[in-house]
Amino acid sequence: MLKQIILMSTLVGLGLLAACSSSTAVSPTSTVEPTPKTAVADADLDAIKQYTLGNAQQMKSGTAALLAVAQTYYDLVAAHNFDYEAAWAQQPEVLTQLTADTKAGWLQASQYYELNEGVIAGVPSLAFYDVWIDAGPSASEDPVTAYEWTLTLPDGRALKSPGNFFHSILEPTIWGTKGECICGL
């Protein structure tokens, strides 16, 4: 794309110089313009691909870390029969560190998703994933446009159309910003 911009700028500049000069203009031998299909086929998108893949890898790393910490947290409170006060009384340092690690994993995953969101939301065949991962409202926020899916919790409770993973489920749970999401973190 940058090569095409430089080429077009150079051609426009040369055209302006030719138009302003006193010498006789030379007629071009070909007037064939590249078609959009040719321009797209000739475009070098490797830098964009590498940028997107790099961000996706960082997001994957953040979500893997988040999953590992969440499993450790779950196992710890399960060992206390989900009595969060008992777990806190016996292992406050561990739970404090797990909470910090959870936040770090979420921040990494979310940050690198945001860097790719324009590509994902902007490509029709991928836009669905943006709704599910980052942008979609819950049914309680917007029953008309909420994505219909069910999150089944380990205790068997089912959350119908709870919204997107990052901002409707994980963020309020990790930071405790919604009372119904506070579960011992």
Image (cartoon, rainbow, N blue to C red):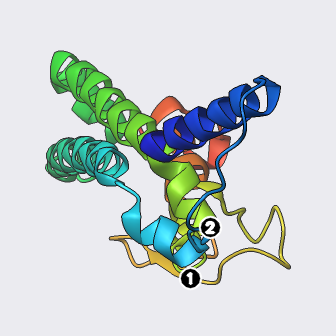
Percent from the top left, x then y, of residue 12? 68, 37
Which quarter of the figure is the C terminus placed in?
A: top left
**Foreground of the two, 167 or 24:** 24
Percent from the top left, x then y, of residue 56? 30, 50
Residue displayed at 61% across by 53% down: 168
Label 1 environment density (alpha carbons within 10 Å; few <14, some 14–19, many ≥20): some
Q: Which mark is residue 149?
A: 1
Residue displayed at 34% across by 54% down: 44
Q: Amino acid at mark 1?
A: Trp
Residue displayed at 79% across by 66% down: 140
44 left or right of 143 in image: left
172 left or right of 105 in image: right
Task: Identify the residue position indicated by label 2 in the image.
Answer: 162
Q: Which mark is residue 80?
A: none
Element marked by disc 2: loop
Q: Is residue 116 visible?
A: yes
79 left or right of 85 in image: left
**Foreground of the two, 111 or 86:** 111
**Foreground of the two, 73 or 107:** 107
Residue at the extreme top: 93
Pointer 2 and pointer 1: residues touching (CB < 8 Å)?
A: yes
Q: Quadrant of residue 130?
A: bottom right
Q: Amino acid at mark 2?
A: Pro
Vertical arrangement, residue 45 with respect to residue 105, above or below: below
Ranked by sequence position, the earlier of labels 2 and 1 is 1
> Marks 2 and 1, how far apart in space?
8 Å
